[in-house]
Amino acid sequence: MAESRMNPVSGGSHEHEIAIESLLDERRHFPPPPAFAAHATLNDPAIFARAAADPVAFWEEQARELDWFEPWHTALEWDLPFAKWFVGGKLNVSYNCLDRHVLAGRGDKIAYHWEGEPGDTKTITYAQLLDEVQRCANALKALGVGKGDRVAIYMPMVPELPVAMLACTRIGAPHTVVFGGFSAESLSDRINDSQAKLVITADGGWRRGKVSPLKPNVDDAVKMSPSVEKVLVVRRTEQDVAWDASRDVWWHDIVPQQAADAAPEPMDSEDMLYLLYTSGTTAKPKGILHTTGGYLTGVAATHRWVFDIKPEDVYWAAADIGWVTGHSYIVYGPLTNGTTSVLYEGTPDFPDAKRWWSIVERYKVTILYAAPTAIRAHMKWGRAHAQHHDLSSLRLLGSVGEPINPEAWMWYHEVIGGGRCPVVDTWWQTETGGIMISPLPGITTTKPGSATQPVPGIFADIVDDKGESVPLGEGGYLVITKPWPHMLRGIYGDPQRYKDTYWSRFPGKYFPGDGCHRDEEGYYWLMGRVDDVMNVSGHRLSTTEIESALVDDHRVAEAAVVGTPDSLTGEAIVAFVIVKGSTTITPELGEELRAHVAHKIGAIARPKQVMFTPDLPKTRSGKIMRRLLRDIAAGRPLGDTTTLADATVVETIRDASANAKDDD
Ligand code: WT7
């Protein structure tokens, strides 16, 4: 089954200009295991045709899986690019996530197995979660928060985080969750843009055995954010914190004292549910706006389909709730489906690299959803950690956040999944709200490195510079061609930026900003952000494929590739490479890796230079910041580094690259 074939570099005799060339040809494929398919929630491919025949009716069918206080009168109002779904319908998100399960007699079912980094644990049932959410909702009201008021949430991964989010939805106050790793300034920017009235935080969170302070950052942020009236503080790490008695309130002094019933506010389907800020090309972050009925319909349906959710599953999305993955697939999707989830506070390598696998074993996790960057870190640490634990409970593996290189896909499949678990590589964005392109594990034959096909009810295409659909077997720009219920409704306060960013490049189509190749069988291979595409001697090459080829060498742990100006070829390829622990760096190794890429992809893709580095600059969500690597490669001063997870890495890489010799 495992065979991979190289493609000769294409000529240039194409009838239209090729937007992005694809040179890597991965031929391994994995049909759904028959035993898995036999019990899968979805195992009839007819669902695709049914959705395509009448997409709006299909999504209405999904919306009926929710509990509505009042039905909608119009399923979709589409005033391009502004969509309204299930217009006139009224519902409450917390009611759908909690009350309806408790009312159906499932109150004792576990909603979250929570585990703190120090090893403390808590089991929370649906009934307990509902109780706590109602008390918190009453506390929010007591603190002056009403329907429509924005609440900023800046917390570690403790149970109070989903409680706070659900309490906001119960009273109709949109939340904006700010990842706990962001600085006071980033927090303040987001509070100011959303004009939040209340901040919910904690004294701190645990990270690699140390307290990562939160309250001090809130104190600094609030000095720059006059909209904030109150700060609600969970006690987690118990260090001393500064206290402003006129503004600050301990969670334990107000929440438990409240009445445990708070009627769910009936919300309009199109009322704002939350804002989630994501960085754009300019410094000002974009407040991605999601609304209520369509969003919940989309995340619940995609969670059911893609993860094949069954009542007895123990599902673990090992992400932070501060990202959209956490919103859609730790909180709203799983709870709407009444799923039992694992919620883990800390880092994957604390106290050691066995932590994740110990969690899988102890809670008998059946479905694991993780990011390629985490999978590659585990590869680097070695398979022994996983092999030390019983992972036989796992039946399905998911990936999200960036393209997963075939090497990491295979490792995940074999070492973690024991060769028996389907792998679902899910492509989506903060803006799309939920999974857009992904295998359905009981139906789709997967290919390592491909997100495969749009899910039912989602319609995509690959287009060239002119916006024309490219034939199968070619690369170009990914676009989404029809509105979908969980799509963003805009950028908060900036409709023009919404139009410019997503709808102006290809009129009438949503442009996510990603390059993509579609093979002869119509499979989608994501090729990274188009801003990262390199132009070498007139060939537009994706970073993803060259990085995949590098990581394919057993000595390479991680690689990032960028283009740097070159008088001869326009751009030349520079590869930044992290080697695995046991490997010694030699000039020959650089040569061998260059040759390996040339062999695997073609001479055009041979990096001009390989730089060995101990680390790579990443955003706090684990995405490589190629922009900074381009600056380093070109010897330019560095641009904005404020979103870096670790600001010291660029200096380390610079030092390493200053010592590297140009091997051409
Ligand atoms: C961007 C969105 C999706 C939730 C977490 C990230 C990249 C995401 C994949 C994938 C290839 C992927 C894209 C996308 N991306 N998933 N499976 N294969 N690329 O959300 O921070 O909004 O980032 O992440 O470039 O546009 P986000």
Image (tube, rainbow, N blue to C red):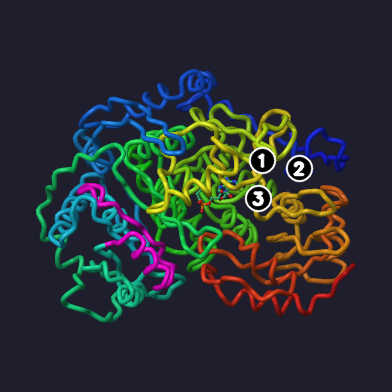
Res 591 label: none
Q: Is residue 575 left or right of residue 370?
A: right
User: How packed is label 2: few (under 14 Cα within 10 Å), some, or many (20 or more)?
Assistant: many
Q: CA distance from mark 2 to mark 1?
A: 9 Å
Q: Is residue 393 above or below residue 203?
A: above
Q: Position of residue 474 (x, y in %)?
A: 74, 36
Residue closer to the observer: 149 or 44: 149
Res 525 label: 1
Q: Amino acid at mark 2?
A: Ser
Q: Position of residue 340 (x, y in %)?
A: 35, 43
Q: Position of residue 102 (x, y in %)?
A: 21, 38
* Residue, far front: 496
Q: CA distance from mark 3 to mark 1?
A: 13 Å
Res 22 label: 2
Q: Which contiguous range is marked in magenta?
A: 168-196
Q: Residue at x 69, y 41 (%)?
A: 465
Q: Is mark 2 within 8 Å of ligand 1?
A: no
Residue closer to the observer: 216 or 15: 15
Q: Is residue 567 left or right of residue 614?
A: right
Tag 2 near tag 1, CB within 8 Å: yes
Q: Is residue 335 in the magenta section? A: no
Q: Quadrant of the N terminus?
A: top right
Nearer mark to the viewer, of 3 and 1: 3
Q: Dot 3 corresponds to which residue?
A: 530
Q: Position of residue 95 (x, y in %)?
A: 23, 40
Q: Is residue 125 left or right of residue 212?
A: left
Q: Earlier in the sequence, mark 3 or mark 1?
A: 1
Q: Earlier in the sequence, mark 2 or mark 3?
A: 2
Q: Earlier in the sequence, mark 2 or mark 1?
A: 2
